[in-house]
């Protein structure tokens, strides 16, 4: 009797094992990257501003859906933090801008051509074990923004107009990020191109994204903007024309450590499907959903990926 019970239990255990194995195979829409053996976890990171958080979160959600083992480390820090983390292997991937590495890491002259800038940084980082995947059509470069009433009062449409107003004695409080003040492609480069110096007593350093809020609240007259930031229009601000081309190209691209792509060779083509969707108008819309409509980064990212058929 005991032998029969034992045999019955053995058959039951084997049946449950087979069922569990069948259920563990994942859905039909997902890839099998996670089941390819002992492969590295992809630690996806980002800088801290909205656009960077969106790009990083979309990458994390997309790769997770495809079945890759991923870890979320969004908002790690700006260039001085996230770049060393990538170089040391603390993170596996994050989105960067071509002009940022070209000027700040390589100490190269600014480039105003997207393909040239991309090829230069891609070749440079190949020696560092870092791979630049295809860049987006989106070029998120800088612009100088002013309040609409300030533009009207001083008749400002170009950045040269602003430089002349300041040289003529106008005291317009300029709010910007400390990083831009210190970066070689920042304040010093801007002043050199427009051949003037902004009065230091009229400059205020603040957190990276506080300029928009300060102008909206009439706490400053001038601020540093990003061309893909939806708050320029939403807050009735004016982005002045960069008539002397002081601001280089900054196309965004996903960076991956080489060993990650060696382990998962399908990632470049999969990421291209995402990158090619991100032009300036699309990126402005995504930023608006977070910064103006106050939706969460995770919600906006998931909705975009779903609408574009990259995840279900």
Image (cartoon, rainbow, N blue to C red):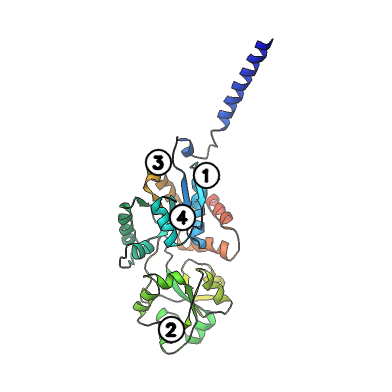
Disc on res. 199: 2
SS at badge 4? loop
Find residue 85 and report its image quarter. bottom left
**Label 3 vs label 4: CA separation?**
25 Å
Say whether residue 198 is left or right of residue 10.
Answer: left
Q: Which residue is drawn at 42% across and 63% down?
A: 139
What residue did someone put label 4 on? 277
* Inter-mark Cα distance, 2 to 1: 51 Å
State which tag comes first along the sequence, 3 or 4. Answer: 3
Q: Are marks 3 and 2 in contact (CB under 8 Å)?
A: no
Look at 61% across and 22% down and name the residue there: 13
Q: Which of marks 1 and 3 is in front?
A: 3
Q: Which of marks 4 and 2 is nearer the N terminus?
A: 2
Q: What element carries label 1?
A: helix
Q: Which residue is drawn at 51% across and 40% down?
A: 30
Q: How many numbered discs?
A: 4
Q: Is residue 177 visible?
A: yes
């Amino acid at each position: 009797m005991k032998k029969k019970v034992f045999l019955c239990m053995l058959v039951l255990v084997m049946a449950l094992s087979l069922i569990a194995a069948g259920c563990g195979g994942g859905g039909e829409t997902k890839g099998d990257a996670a089941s390819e053996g002992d492969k590295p976890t992809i630690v996806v990171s980002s800088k801290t501003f909205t656009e960077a958080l969106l790009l990083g979160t979309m990458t994390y959600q997309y790769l997770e859906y495809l079945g890759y083992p991923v870890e979320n480390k969004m908002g790690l820090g700006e260039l001085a933090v996230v770049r060393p983390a990538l170089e040391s292997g603390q993170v596996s991937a994050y989105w960067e801008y071509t002009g940022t590495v070209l000027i700040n890491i390589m100490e190269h002259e600014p480039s105003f051509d997207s393909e040239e800038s991309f090829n230069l940084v891609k070749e440079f980082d190949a020696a560092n074990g870092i791979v630049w995947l295809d860049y987006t059509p989106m070029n998120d470069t800088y612009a100088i923004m002013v309040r609409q009433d300030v533009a009207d009062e001083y008749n400002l449409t170009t950045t040269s107009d602003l430089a002349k107003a300041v040289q003529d004695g106008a005291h317009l409080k300029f709010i910007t990020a400390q990083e831009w003040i210190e970066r070689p492609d920042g304040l010093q480069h801007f002043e050199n191109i427009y051949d003037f110096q902004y009065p230091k007593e009229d400059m205020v350093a603040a957190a990276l994204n506080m300029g928009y809020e300060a102008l909206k609240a009439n706490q400053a007259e001038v601020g540093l903007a990003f061309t893909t930031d939806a708050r320029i229009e939403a807050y009735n601000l004016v982005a002045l024309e960069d008539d002397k081309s002081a601001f280089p190209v900054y196309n965004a691209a996903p960076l991956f450590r080489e060993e990650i792509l060696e382990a998962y060779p399908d990632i470049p083509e999969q990421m291209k499907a995402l990158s090619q969707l991100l032009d300036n108008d699309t990126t402005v819309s995504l930023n608006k959903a977070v910064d103006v409509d106050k939706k969460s980064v995770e919600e906006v990212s998931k909705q975009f990926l779903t609408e574009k058929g990259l995840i279900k």
